[in-house]
Image: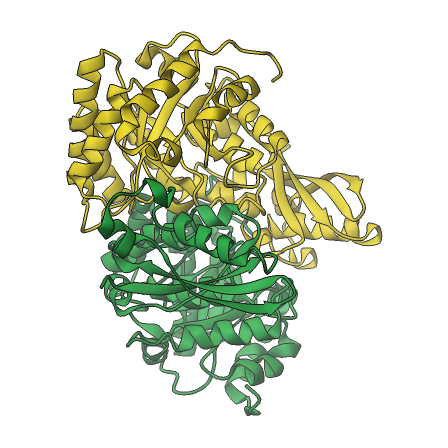
Chain colours: A yellow, B green
Amino acid sequence: MTARFTVTYHVRAEASAIEARTQAIAVEQSVEMPLAAIDDATVLMDILGKVEAIDHIKDETFAVRIGLATATVGQDAGQFLNMLFGNTSLHDDVVLHDIAIPPELIAAFGGPRHGIDRLRQRLGIAKRAFTGSALKPQGLPPDRLGMLAERFARAGLDFVKDDHGLADQSYSLFADRVRACADGVARGARATGHPTRYIPSLTGSLDQMRTQAQLAQSLGLDTVMLAPMIAGFATMQALVRSFPGMAFFAHPSLGGAARIAPELLIGKLFPLIGADAVIFPNHGGRFGYSPGTCRQLAKNARAPGGGMRGALPVPAGGMTLDRVGEILDFHGPDTMLLIGGNLLMARERIIEEATAFARLVADHAYRRDS
Amino acid sequence: MTARFTVTYHVRAEASAIEARTQAIAVEQSVEMPLAAIDDATVLMDILGKVEAIDHIKDETFAVRIGLATATVGQDAGQFLNMLFGNTSLHDDVVLHDIAIPPELIAAFGGPRHGIDRLRQRLGIAKRAFTGSALKPQGLPPDRLGMLAERFARAGLDFVKDDHGLADQSYSLFADRVRACADGVARGARATGHPTRYIPSLTGSLDQMRTQAQLAQSLGLDTVMLAPMIAGFATMQALVRSFPGMAFFAHPSLGGAARIAPELLIGKLFPLIGADAVIFPNHGGRFGYSPGTCRQLAKNARAPGGGMRGALPVPAGGMTLDRVGEILDFHGPDTMLLIGGNLLMARERIIEEATAFARLVADHAYRRDS
């Protein structure tokens, strides 16, 4: 018997058509050819996707479970995504909903190398939620970003991350920006005694990202961020392997959430390939994820199972100071709060505002409703 | 004045809300923070996305045009996609519809390095459409795939490509498969005198793909395939630069066509970053693209403008021999016909069937309706 892992798709179809449609997905995501043309018994037995269940959800929507052969993935995270949703992403009646991650893939991809527990150790935070903000806007020169980074660090925030729009632009080259921001955070951290971490955003090809991560390492940084859907899963997989001391934050850019369930893509797949923390658009902000989606996404990230470390959920995307209590009650302390633009609204009062943010998180008395 | 390029999004909104929604997209895809918190005049003038037009399409759908600053892209194809649709992909009311590619980005990314004309030169084909088939199913050992490759070559097809599911799996390692298939095609080509090309599919990280492309090169191959949405745009950009002699076929896997218009993603963006040929699911096959979408996609690929070479459109995805005439009339001769599974249905008669395919294309008398 070949090892298989179960993939759940949500499919829009009439009841009379769902069996044939499910079988067609099983074929598309495995052998991708007419079965009548296959004369190899092993392929039909061990490689062809296998329909495991078809459940009616409501109206013309079904949850279908298909067992894909683990051997088709090999050791490659890119091929993994290809097998999960490659051609089927081109069909607009199907959403990739969930997978059951098998031990073979955990062994291949490894999950978070540091995860929540080690992030707590690094920052010396026993119980409370983490805090973070973002360096914006793109277009500022390195010294301005460095000054802002210093202010956030002086406020005692735990993480100061690059905005995901900061890349390697002529007006703010990666090397210049990262030096300026690392220096800024280091100055702030020396002033407070709190080991605030700066998180540069890696961009470009694997070669470029590797050079960037090496520079970050040489500056004493131990955390970086990338967007797996932009970079490619295989790129992230390679980086995570090459920099075992680095903690990786995953940014959801290009997450195309309408077609791949965010609970799966951000909550499960990003951690599987090595994200130690996953940034996602929290409900009630600029993005449309529901509270239920956010809760499940965070739960998936924290408890990936199979012996993997938990990844830190980072609700973000238009969060405000007046929501800190509510977000903490909703998500609990194994969470990092990321407030970007709304802290920046304080302009020259940025240190006071960020300090207030840090205090709110430190002093919060949790109400249990999550 | 900063250089800008125009991005068109289709947005679902009520008429009373569309102006604010468009402005919000312009902010999200540039500075990603409240404007009131920006105190740098240069950022507001030169970096902030600029709403250029809002046109009503029908009902509650609008076409909105936003000018993004070219400087925010830098030289990185990944960052380019990030700027086009990074966070906005997470909003389900927006489709990335089109862009006007500016000369700065053509200079940065280069477009197809070989394109239709050089593919014609290599194959010695003056006018007719190209033919191709795919090696399937995954799960077959290398020698079986090599035998199939030889048969397709003996039939006189122009291209024999790996199925996009073939990766570096334990039952068929890349190096073994590519040697077997290159040998098979070479034997077939010697028999016919026609210079049939084998197209291996590159998978994994940039490092792995580079090793694979080097192996392909050492075997005398001059064409490869990859899936830009799986590999990452920056990965493709780096490979195209590193292997100027290789022609690149782009596979649409993970194209998520419902959220990024395929005319744009496959027809324009893949060529821009160096695809010489773009495979897409043709209308009337297994996928849901309309004839209008396919026609526009192919037109975009062939005539990318700005001095770029034309990329070869490759309609595929469940094509059959009895549709060859119709497809050729629809798409014209600057096209490669790719028939995979349906040729394989012929099983032991595969050479005769593939030969008939090659003849149909060679002998076709075009009716002008495209």
Work out which quarter of the rendered image holds the C terminus of chain A and state it: top right
Left or right: where B125 falls relative to B217: right
Snapshot quadrant of residue A203: top left
Q: In this view, does A102 lie above or below B297?
A: above
Q: Where is residue A284 in the image (x, y as percent from the top left)?
A: 55, 34
Q: Is residue B258 above or below residue B152?
A: above
- Residue in the picture at 62% in, 82% down: B326
Task: State left or right for residue A173 relative to residue B275.
Answer: left
Q: Position of residue B175 (x, y in %)?
A: 37, 48
Question: Residue placed at 42% from the left, 61% from the top?
Answer: B250
Rendered view: A122 above or below B275: above
Name which residue lies at 24% across and 26% down. Answer: A151
Query: Where is residue A251, by image quadrant?
Result: top left
- Residue B319 horizontal/vertical position (percent): 61, 70
Q: Quadrant of residue A368?
A: top right
Q: In this view, does A281 lie above or below A48?
A: above
